[in-house]
Image: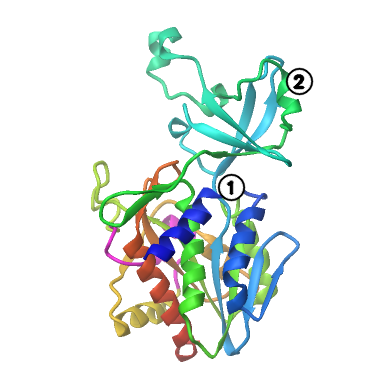
Amino acid sequence: MTEMKELLRKLAEAPGVPGYEDEIRAIVEAEIKQYADEIKTDKLGNLIATKHGKKPSVMIAAHLDEIGLMVKHIEDEGFIRFSTMGGWFDQTLLNQRVILHTSGSTVFGVIGSKPPHKMKKEEREKVVKFEDMFIDIGARSKAEVEQAGISIGTPVTIDRHLVALKNERVTCKAFDNRSGVATMIEALKRTNTEFEIYVVGTVQEEVGLKGARTSAFELNPDAAIAIDTDIAGGHPGIEKKDTTVEMEKGPVITVSDAAGRGIITPPSVLKWLKETASHHNIQYQLSVSEGGTTDATAIILTRSGIPTGVIGVPTRYIHSPVELLSLKDLDKCAELIARAVERVGDYF
């Protein structure tokens, strides 16, 4: 469990907004190179590792990117306006400390807005939108900002470090989807299979499932598993009717998401994953949700259709700087995927 925690720390603390996943890709490659026969980066930036074997082939995909920000305007006084990259709830951004990633260094800043003392009553009662926020790096002019290496297009991430909580639970930014990436790495290390495996760190999932679409088209596997987070309830504000998924109850097998507009998992895939879990005494959960989808939606629609499923890591407070999960669930997710890869030949 300690090794998985440190792997998750390394992945979650590293920056990787959509289109700028280089550091995450390098970490993944270093972790898996001794377990793969071939590793390459495709034109879009997907990391594709192949472990050769016989048919049927299986693709394991986890997206490398995290939601983040991007510089879109620098004011004459040195304040920086930004655009969001991925699905932020604006309230979670206010007053956060951020890191601006220039080509040569990192620059720290804070997200500011008008103080409540200077707001009118009707302003205080409204949610502050990101358009009304700005980043302050301490500069006194636009020239100072530019001298720091910051320009339009500079990527920005939240400044957060992983910390341990009670009961083998941890919190950090970017568990969506660095927890999936850690699971993918660990599953590859654990599996002992005769079948061909493609391990794919996909890019730009948070802005359109882009890397999954192109990599699946190239590889055309016989089956696929996408690994991502799944919204865990069990806390105030979330009722059982909203989600039955909870932490420490094992991997989540998606039945459908986005009210069916995302993936409706094929019965053959559900049978594969559920029977594997039961055979190996791995507790699992099922999920039907109305909102959000994963790389699986792009993979299943590739070419003439690729049988695809989703394994989710139960995670609280996703798309925020304080995402929270259980290392026990992470371990069981890796175990289920490792064992499913070994049994793929019985189903496809």
Numbered label attached to residue 143 = 2
Q: What whole-number distance in Å separates the C-alpha atoms at marks 2 and 1?
A: 26 Å
Relative placement, left or right, of 3 versus 216 is left
Rendered residue at 43%/57% (across/down): 229
Determine which quarter of the picture holds residue 212.
Answer: bottom right
Q: Is residue 268 visible?
A: no
Q: Nearer the viewer, residue 347 or 117?
A: 117
| Residues packed near mark 1 inside 10 Å, few (<14), some (14 to 19) or many (20 plus) | many
x and y percent of residue 21 in the render? 64, 53
User: Callout 1: helix, strand or loop?
Assistant: loop
Mark closest to the chain's N terminus, 2 or 1: 1
Rendered residue at 35%/78% (across/down): 274
x and y percent of residue 77 in the render? 68, 14
Numbered label attached to residue 15 = 1
User: Callout 2: helix, strand or loop?
Assistant: helix
x and y percent of residue 194 in the render? 54, 91
Q: Which residues are magenta?
A: 246-265
Determine which quarter of the picture holds residue 311.
Answer: bottom left
| Residues packed near mark 2 inside 10 Å, few (<14), some (14 to 19) or many (20 plus) | some
Relative placement, left or right, of 274 versus 344 is left
In magenta stretch: residue 151: no
Colour scheme: rainbow
Q: Nearer the viewer, residue 283 or 108?
A: 108
Q: Is residue 314 above or below residue 145?
A: below
Numbered label attached to residue 209 = none
Amino acid identity at mark 2: Ala
Relative placement, left or right, of 258 versus 244 is right
For the N terminus, the image quarter is bottom left
Relative placement, left or right, of 320 versus 54 is left
Amino acid identity at mark 1: Pro
Labels 2 & 1 near each other (Cβ < 8 A): no
Q: Is residue 29 above or below residue 38?
A: above
